[in-house]
Image (spheres, grey):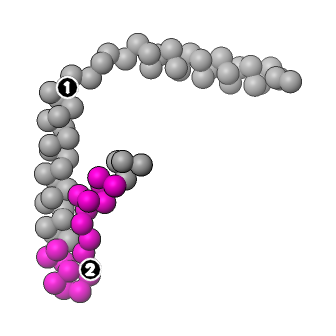
């Protein structure tokens, strides 16, 4: 059984979801440009991690980790 509080929460959720429906579609070129920029930053960070590995901090493959997480 729904209480008044549950109903109010449901109503707020419904309103929030309606706002999301109104969001404009993302520009594919902007998305791709952002993705390339992110991956370049990831590669830069990977290089810094590799350099740190020479000082005994350890290193991993950040881009591969990102791709694996993205696929899940």
Please tell me whether mark 2 sits on a helix, a strand or a loop.
Answer: loop
Horizontal placement of 14 versus 22: left or right?
right
> Which residue sits at x=18%, y=62%?
45
How far across and how far down the image is residue 4, in percent?
Answer: 80, 20
Q: Quadrant of the N terminus?
A: top right
Picture quadrant of residue 35: top left
> Which residue sits at x=37%, y=53%?
69
Mark number, residue 6: none
Please tell me whether mark 1 sits on a helix, a strand or a loop.
Answer: helix
Q: Nearer the viewer, mark 2 or mark 1?
A: 1
Residue range in magenta is: 50-68
Characterize the local packing of mark 1: few (<14), some (14-19) or many (20 or more) Cα atoms within 10 angstroms: few
Picture quadrant of residue 7: top right
Horizontal placement of 29 versus 70: left or right?
left
- Could you tell me how far apart the alpha carbons at marks 2 and 1 are, in whole angstroms? 37 Å
Q: Nearer the viewer, residue 11 or 42?
A: 42
How far across and how far down the image is residue 42, in percent?
Answer: 20, 56
Q: How many marks?
A: 2
How far across and how far down the image is residue 36, in percent?
Answer: 14, 43
Q: Residue furthest bottom?
A: 56
> Which residue sits at x=34%, y=55%?
68
> Which residue sits at x=15%, y=44%?
37
Residue tagged 2 = 58
Contact flag, marks 2 and 1 (Cβ < 8 Å) = no
The answer to whether residue 7 is magenta is no
Q: Residue furthest right?
A: 1
Q: In the image, is residue 65 above or below residue 24?
A: below
User: Disc 2 or 1, which lies upstream in sequence?
Assistant: 1
How far across and how far down the image is residue 25, in percent?
Answer: 30, 18
Residue tagged 1 = 28
Characterize the local packing of mark 2: few (<14), some (14-19) or many (20 or more) Cα atoms within 10 angstroms: few
């Amino acid at each position: 059984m729904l209480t008044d509080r549950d109903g109010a929460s449901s109503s707020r959720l419904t309103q929030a979801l309606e706002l999301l429906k109104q969001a404009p579609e993302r520009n594919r070129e902007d998305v791709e440009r952002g993705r390339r920029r992110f991956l370049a930053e990831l590669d830069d960070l990977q290089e810094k991690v590799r350099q740190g590995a020479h000082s005994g901090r350890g290193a991993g493959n950040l881009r591969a980790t990102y791709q694996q997480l993205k696929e899940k």
